[in-house]
Image: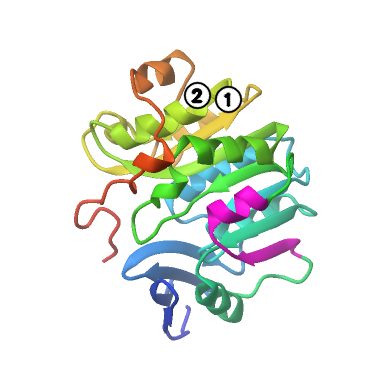
Amino acid sequence: MNESIPVLRTTDHGTAKLMPDVDRARAWLLTVDGAPQSYVDLDDPSYLEFEYARRLGYVLDVVAEAGRALDVAHLGGGALTLPRYVAATRPGSRQDVVEADAALLELVVEHLPLLAGSGVELHAADARAWLEGAPDDHADVLIADVFGGSRVPAHLTTRAYAREAERVLRPGGVYLANLADSAPFAFLRSQLAAFAELFEELLLIAEPGVLRGRRFGNAVLVASHRPLDVAALARRTAADAFPARVEHGAAVREFIGGARPVEDADAVPSPEPPDGAFGIG
């Protein structure tokens, strides 16, 4: 039983709240302005509560042989769920975490500290600015999970941003993004279109109901210059408590249709979720 008390703090970009999970002894939920952002179990960093986080984790599991250390850059920090996951499942990995809200990072490090020797370096910076300043061939994996409130900021949705992401990745590197949209998927299609210009391999992971346009929800975009183990990934996502489908190849190209990448001058944030889409009880 977790008898810790909630922590509430005003940060640079909103009101953050850390709430203990009554069912797991050292587990916490982070919300910002009421929107769930992260879930962390300090006793079991490999435990991923949110469905989208598990899907990102499944991709991380197949990008290289089990246990191999990787250089990973995370755009968006939250409570550092995925950096903790990588540190636990791929010991010795070097990780950069970029989070625009410096006060949020301070809150997380204070109450949910990283283990010593985690290999995680924290950067209080804008994700696009940090990316543009990063060297070529810097990372094996680049993960984008950046939300201003419940929307992806406009400057992280463009063709120029995609080019920077591709530049920072090594030749065998993999890009992952947590996105959210609903039919007719104008935002999601434009994101796929931008990365289709740069990468030979594209995957889209989402619940069937989201892909069929029945509801608003998360979708994971995966881009790579090399084939990934789609069959293994499909098995993992299909067996999840909230099963998802892995679309790839011709199905992704068909989904993109005639969509075009967005230029910086025309960029807008991702769509506003409907009320209750990502709420908590």
Quarter of image, res 83: bottom right
Q: Amino acid at mark 2?
A: Ala
> What is the x, y in percent for residue 196?
50, 24
Determine contact: label 2, label 1, CB under 8 Å: yes
Q: Secondary structure at mark 1?
A: loop
Magenta part of the protein: which range? 118-133
Q: Residues within 10 Å of mark 1 (few under 14, many from 20)?
A: some
Compared with residue 23, is residue 133 higher up or lower down, i.e. above or below?
above
- In percent of the image, x 37 and y 16: which residue is there? 254
Which residue matches tag 2?
A: 196
- Label 2, label 1: how far apart the Cα atoms are: 5 Å
> From this viewpoint, is residue 246 visible?
no
Is 123 in the magenta? yes
- Which residue is found at the position 23% from the left and 31% from the top? 184
Q: Quadrant of residue 193?
A: top left
Answer above or below: position of 265 versus 133. Answer: above
* Observer able to see residue 263: yes
Rendered image: mark on residue 199: 1
